[in-house]
Image (spheres, rainbow, N blue to C red):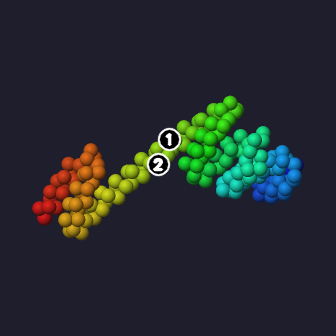
Amino acid sequence: YREARAHLAARRYEEAAARFEAAAATINAAAAAAAWFGRGEALYGAKRWEAAMAAYDALLKTCPEGALAPNALYSRGHAEHQAGHLERALATFTEFKRRYPDHALAAASALSINTLSLALEAQARQQSVAAVTRELAAINASVHAEKYEEARAAAERFLQAHPGHPQAADLRYLAATCAYR
C-alpha cells in the first residue's frame, strides 16, 4: 500500500494502480477499501475513466458503509462525467447528495448537479437544432432534385411540427410553389 501511495504521489499512475490492486487482496476490509479507493485515484489520474469507475464500484460493493464510501461515490461521479456519461454522473451526484447531505463534499456535489443539468439541457437543445437543420436540408434537397411533391409534403410536416419556426413563412411559400410546380 505504501509503495502504491509513493507511485501515486510521483504520478506514476499505472504502477500505482497495479500496486493498489495487489493491496486490495487483503482480508482487512478497511485496508481493502483504502486500496480500492487508491486504485480509483490512480486510474483517474491515468485518464482511464471506465477502470476508475470499476475501482470505485468495487469499494462501494465491498464496503458500502465505510468511511471512504462517500468519497468513492463522489469520485465515481467525476469519472462518469469525464467518460461522457453525463446522465449517469448526474444520477451519481444526486445519489451522493441524498445519502450524504451533511458531508463536506455535499456543496461540491450540488454544484456538479447544477453543471451537469445545464450541460444536459444544452445537449438536448443542440440535438433539437441539429434535427431541425436536417429536416430543412432534406426539404431543400428535394427541391433541388425537383421532387416537388416530396418537398411540399416535407414542408407541411415541418410546419405542423414547428409552427413558430422563424422560416415558417418561407416554408409556406415553398410548399405553395411546390404544389404549383
Q: What residue is at 23 percent from the left and 65 percent from the top?
A: 150
Estimate how packed mark 1 is, as few (under 14), some (14 to 19) or many (20 or more) residues with alpha carbons within 10 Å.
few
Q: What percent of the width, then of the height, locates residue 45? A: 71, 51
* First-in-chain label (1 vs 2): 1
Left or right: 130, with 28 as reference point: left
Residue extending furthest toward the top: 102
Q: Is residue 95 above or below residue 44?
A: above
Q: Which type of secondary structure does the marked residue at label 1 adopt? A: helix
Q: What residue is at 17 percent from the left and 53 percent from the top?
A: 173
Mark 1 sits on what residue?
Answer: 118
Q: What residue is at 34 percent from the left and 53 percent from the top?
A: 132
Q: What percent of the width, then of the height, locates residue 51? A: 70, 57
Q: Is residue 37 above or below residue 146?
A: above
Kind of residue indicated by mark 2: Gln
Q: What residue is at 42 percent from the left and 50 percent from the top?
A: 126
Distance of mark 1 from mark 2, alpha carbons?
9 Å
Res. 94 image quadrant: top right
Left or right: 53, with 36 as reference point: left
Left or right: 108, with 31 as reference point: left
Work out which quarter of the rendered image holds the C terminus and state it: bottom left
Mark 2 sits on what residue?
Answer: 123
Residue 6 can be seen in this image: no
Residue extending furthest toward the left: 180
Residue 32 can be seen in this image: yes
Estimate how packed mark 2 is, as few (under 14), some (14 to 19) or many (20 or more) residues with alpha carbons within 10 Å.
few
Kind of residue indicated by mark 1: Leu
Q: What percent of the width, then of the height, locates residue 83? A: 61, 53
Mark 1 vs 2: CB contact within 8 A: no
Q: What percent of the width, then of the height, locates residue 7? A: 82, 52
Left or right: 181, with 4 as reference point: left
Q: Is residue 154 above or below residue 34?
A: below
